[in-house]
Amino acid sequence: MATKVFKFIKDKLFVDSIVFIRNNVIEPLSKLIIIDYGSNSNGSYIKYGNGDMICYKTINVSSNITNRWGNMYESTSAVSLGNWPVEFKDTPTINVNKTSGQGSWLQLINGLSKTSCGNTYFVSAVSSSVTTNLNIIGIGKWK
């Protein structure tokens, strides 16, 4: 059930005055709306009124996967995933999806922080090279 409580002062509507009721708890609508959004060279972000933030970007990476690793091969150096477009309050949860290139996959993400998406290595069953796009999403808090 939603309840609208409008408060006008000098012809301006205050969003905090619009409330919704969920599980018999009254909360301001501002917790659910987008407070800020934008983008820069490090990607895009959306900040929500409840403190949640989502950062996302797509990067193009290339790597040689020629270092022997047991019965497998891994990339010769770590692949940087870059920085977040804005800093998180704490280290976020990350999801990285490889969108192209067959026969290789990503290892764990290392070096993830409030400001950095971290880095990773590619792994393959055969010695090869890969060029692919990576979709990166971080979910955490901005306040």
Image (cartoon, rainbow, N blue to C red):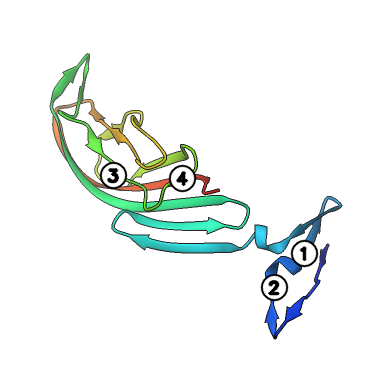
The amino acid type found where label 4 is placed reads Phe
Q: Position of residue 129 (x, y in %)?
A: 14, 37
86 relative position to 122: left or right: right
First along the sequence among labels 1 and 4: 1
Furthest residue toward front: 10
Q: Considering only order in the chain, which callout, 2 or 3, is on the residue closer to the N terminus?
A: 2
The residue to which callout 2 is attached is: 14
Dot 4: element: loop
**Above or below: residue 68 compared with residue 121:** above
- Residue identified by numbered label 3: 82
The earlier-in-sequence mark between 1 and 2 is 2
Q: Of helix, strand and loop, which one carries label 2?
A: loop
Q: Which residue is most to the top?
A: 70
Instruction: Identify the residue position indicated by label 1 in the image.
Output: 19
Mark 3 against mark 2, which lies toward the viewer? 2
Q: Is residue 43 above or below residue 98?
A: below
Residue drawn at x 36%, y 48% as measured from the top left: 84
Q: Residues at badges 1 and 3 in contact (C-beta under 8 Å)?
A: no
The residue lying at 46 percent from left, 45 percent from top is 88
Residue 47 screen position, x and y as percent: 52, 57
